[in-house]
Image: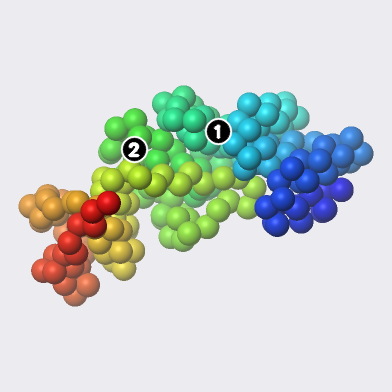
């Protein structure tokens, strides 16, 4: 039942996945926490956040030190525009698994949306130091917040985090996105200690000399 549900999830047939995860919960013993978490993700993919939260709480009931449902609880609130409320759940996920790059990424994005920018950069830096590809990948069991429509600030702070780690190519890529979204404070870049680390990079110099024109809607 669980394997069939996983196949439906991969095919994005979420109502069928819900059905088979529920069947698995009635028949499988010893995997209750994992199954409830998967059921929550299936509900969440359909924006059924109340049902998703109930499932995640069941997962935590069976395994209190299971970080993924804590993370996913935070994501349900974030996706409803409640970034401040999501913070405590992301913090708990990070506490339970400090090496979870996606948990740090989500916490950083929640900090960003509550205007706690230094905290956001610190979490982005930690996430990227753990996994430089975390922005391109989703956690195997959880969900990664995607924060589109945030303007240039999100891309600027992501570029700053990459620059702080000396990951020049990614820093330049996100800084380019920031320019495209309207960023134009070159003086800030000159003074920022993180961007100073990549200031001699040809790609960075080329971007500053020929920044893209902001893309208007």
* Mark identifier at residue 112: 2
Q: In the rendered image, which residue does mark 1 sit on?
A: 76
Q: Is residue 213 left or right of residue 20?
A: left
Q: Foreground: 177 or 191?
A: 177
Percent x, y of residue 13: 72, 50
> Which element carries disc 1, helix, strand or loop?
helix
Percent x, y of residue 169: 31, 68
Marks 2 and 1 sit apart, C-alpha to C-alpha, by 17 Å
Percent x, y of residue 214: 20, 57
Mark yes or no: residue 90 visible: no
Q: Residue at x 28, y 58 (%)?
A: 177
Residue 206 vertical position relative to residue 195 in the rendered view, above or below: below
Percent x, y of residue 16: 78, 46
Q: Foreground: 116 or 97?
A: 116
Q: Is residue 205 left or right of residue 28?
A: left
Mark yes or no: residue 177 visible: yes
- At label 2, counting other C-alpha atoms closer than 10 Å, the crowd grade (few under 14, some 14-19, many 20 or more) is many
Residue 61 vertical position relative to residue 31 in the rendered view, above or below: above
- At label 1, counting other C-alpha atoms closer than 10 Å, the crowd grade (few under 14, some 14-19, many 20 or more) is many
Q: Is residue 45 left or right of residue 174?
A: right
């Amino acid at each position: 039942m669980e394997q069939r549900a996983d196949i439906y999830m991969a095919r994005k047939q979420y109502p069928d996945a819900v059905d088979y995860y529920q069947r698995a919960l009635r028949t499988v013993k010893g995997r209750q926490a994992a199954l409830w978490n998967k059921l929550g993700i299936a509900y969440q993919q359909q924006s059924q956040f109340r049902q998703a939260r109930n499932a995640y709480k069941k997962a935590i009931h069976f395994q209190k030190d299971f970080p993924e449902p804590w993370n996913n609880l935070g994501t349900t609130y974030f996706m409803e525009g409640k970034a401040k409320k999501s913070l405590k759940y992301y913090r708990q996920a990070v506490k339970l698994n400090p090496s979870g790059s996606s948990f740090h990424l989500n916490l950083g994005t929640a900090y960003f949306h509550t205007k706690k920018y230094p905290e956001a950069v610190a979490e982005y830096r930690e996430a990227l130091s753990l996994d430089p590809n975390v922005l391109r990948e989703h956690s195997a069991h959880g969900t990664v917040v995607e924060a589109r429509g945030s303007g240039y600030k999100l891309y600027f702070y992501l570029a700053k985090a990459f620059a702080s780690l000396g990951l020049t190519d990614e820093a330049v890529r996100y800084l380019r996105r920031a320019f495209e979204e309207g960023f134009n404070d070159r003086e800030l870049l000159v003074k920022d200690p993180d961007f100073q680390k990549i200031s001699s990079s040809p790609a960075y110099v080329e971007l500053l000399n020929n920044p893209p024109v902001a893309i208007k809607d």
